[in-house]
Image (cartoon, rainbow, N blue to C red):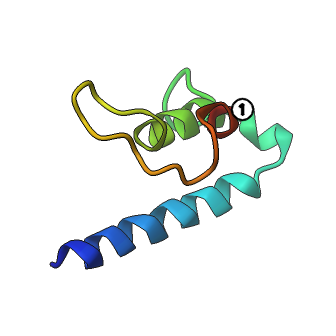
Amino acid sequence: MRRRTIAAAVAAERRELADVLDALTPDRWDAPSLRAGWRVREVAAHLSLGFRTTLPGRASPPNCCGPAAACTG
């Protein structure tokens, strides 16, 4: 696969996840997940960690949603 094709697929997957999370009601955010001890909000934070942070020595992720504080709100 070409780099652009992969990047487009990743971007589409991230948008789809954002749409799913955006549609959650406050009750659903606090609902238990399939992971024992984790609510939906913890799973969402775990899944989105790579979008919001970088490893030391790596390039910063694209600023897709504004300042980091806005992403983690």
- Quadrant location, the C terminus: top right
| Residue lying at the far right of the rendered structure | 26
- Residue 33 x, y percent position in the rendering: 58, 37
Depth order, front residue of 13/66: 66
Provide residue 31's location: percent of width, then percent of height: 72, 35
**Residue pointed to by mark 1:** 73
Residue 35 position, x and y percent, is 48, 32
Name the spot of residue 70 as percent of width and height, x first. 69, 37
Q: Residues within 10 Å of mark 1 (few under 14, many from 20)?
A: few
Quadrant in which residue 18 is drawn: bottom right
What residue lies at 56% left-to-right and 66% top-to-bottom?
A: 16
| Image-based side of 49 in relation to 4, left or right | right
In what element is the residue under mark 1?
A: loop
Q: Residue at x 63, y 38 (%)?
A: 67
**Residue in the picture at 40% in, 40% down:** 50
Kind of residue indicated by mark 1: Gly
